[in-house]
Image (spheres, coloured by chain):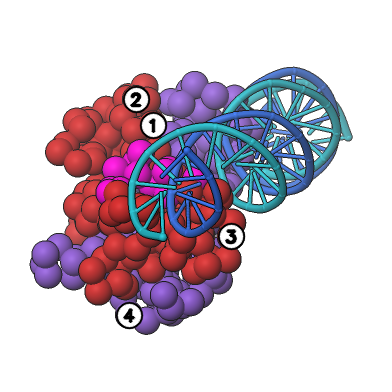
Chain colours: A red, B purple, C blue, D cyan
Amino acid sequence: MPKTLPLLEDASPICCDPLGSSATLALDDAMALAVRLKALADPTRLQLLAYLLAQPDQEACTCDLAPVVKLSEPTVSHHLKKLETSGILTKERHGMSVHYRVVPEAIHAIARTLDTATRALTQVV
Amino acid sequence: MPKTLPLLEDASPICCDPLGSSATLALDDAMALAVRLKALADPTRLQLLAYLLAQPDQEACTCDLAPVVKLSEPTVSHHLKKLETSGILTKERHGMSVHYRVVPEAIHAIARTLDTATRALTQVV
DNA sequence: CCACCTCTTTGATATATGTCAAGAAGGTGG
DNA sequence: CCACCTTCTTGACATATATCAAAGAGGTGG
């Protein structure tokens, strides 16, 4: 039983590449992927993302988002910050309000990481 | 600003379909996706998955996995249980030991959910 | 400059999670 | 049936996370 694990290997442009792509997986790489997955792994944040993705201009401000998930603005602000520091959202001031916007490539990169990790097996099997 | 959110919509075969596929996202659906993402969103569990995926027969027992992540067997057992109850692993007794195996379709379903949620946008933009 | 709006930070609290040691449970083989 | 191996459960503990109210920070407009 080998000590090495094939999970994340290099940190590609936006996210990762890891998960079984080749040889050994370092703890650091696993943690990097885990941080991004953790950012997604919350019902409130998924709802916020869904709402943003559904907007015509794909953006919204904190005061619009709070009622959507029925939580206080500070709480929503906290969730938005987590998504932003994970690279999943960008923020931009427009006058008094702050507009948040999804970074599709960030989510796509995570999806691709998971997909390629298992695609090989699905074909082999 | 609509009250509804387009995240998860129907519970497809193995996982989900949600994330922006169409109309409104229910909290229940968001929680269902979140549970699966949470199962993946841990460095230790990612390492365990990577190790399993790298095995020739794609399976391993608890006693092999514990040294890989350098944690106690009870802790590893706890992580494996979480992955199993999320549908990401299956377990099977072989004599004294228990063999765990990845369910590629489960991970693939999650990846597809994230991918389709953002693919539309990536194209539109 | 001051009232006001939006957003974020801080402090507090409750719950969830990761971890281990110790012991129970399931199974094998003399 | 008893010693032993692997695995799981339990109880305890530390850390992380989600949440809110209150107060601070950034920006607008009379």
Residue C1 higher or lower than B17, as above or below: above
Q: Residue at x 31, y 30 (%)?
A: A29
Q: Determine if the magenta segment contains residue A80.
A: yes
- Please name the amino acid that badge 3 sits on: Leu
Which contiguous range is marked in magenta? A78-92
Are the numbered discs 1 and 2 placed on the same chain, yes or no? yes
| Residue on which disc 1 sits | A31
Among the two numbered marks 3 and 1 on one chain, the one whose residue lies closer to the N terminus: 1
Q: Are marks 1 and 2 in contact (CB under 8 Å)?
A: yes
Q: CA distance from mark 4 to mark 2?
A: 36 Å
Return the chain for callout 2: A
Examine the rendering and report whether any part of residue B42 can be seen: yes
The disc placed on residue A71 is: 3
Where is the N terminus of chain B found, in terms of image quarters? bottom left
| Tag in front: 4 or 1 | 4
| Residue on which disc 2 sits | A28
Provide residue A28's location: percent of width, then percent of height.
34, 25
Observer-nearest of A118 and C29: A118
Q: Are marks 2 and 3 in contact (CB under 8 Å)?
A: no
Q: Determine if the magenta segment contains residue A40.
A: no
- Please name the amino acid that badge 4 sits on: Ser
Q: CA distance from mark 1 to mark 2?
A: 5 Å
- Please name the amino acid that badge 1 sits on: Met
Return the chain for callout 1: A
Q: Residues within 10 Å of mark 1 (few under 14, many from 20)?
A: some
Q: Is residue A30 left or right of residue B99?
A: left
Provide residue A107's location: percent of width, then percent of height.
27, 53
| Residue on which disc 4 sits | B22
- Please name the amino acid that badge 2 sits on: Asp
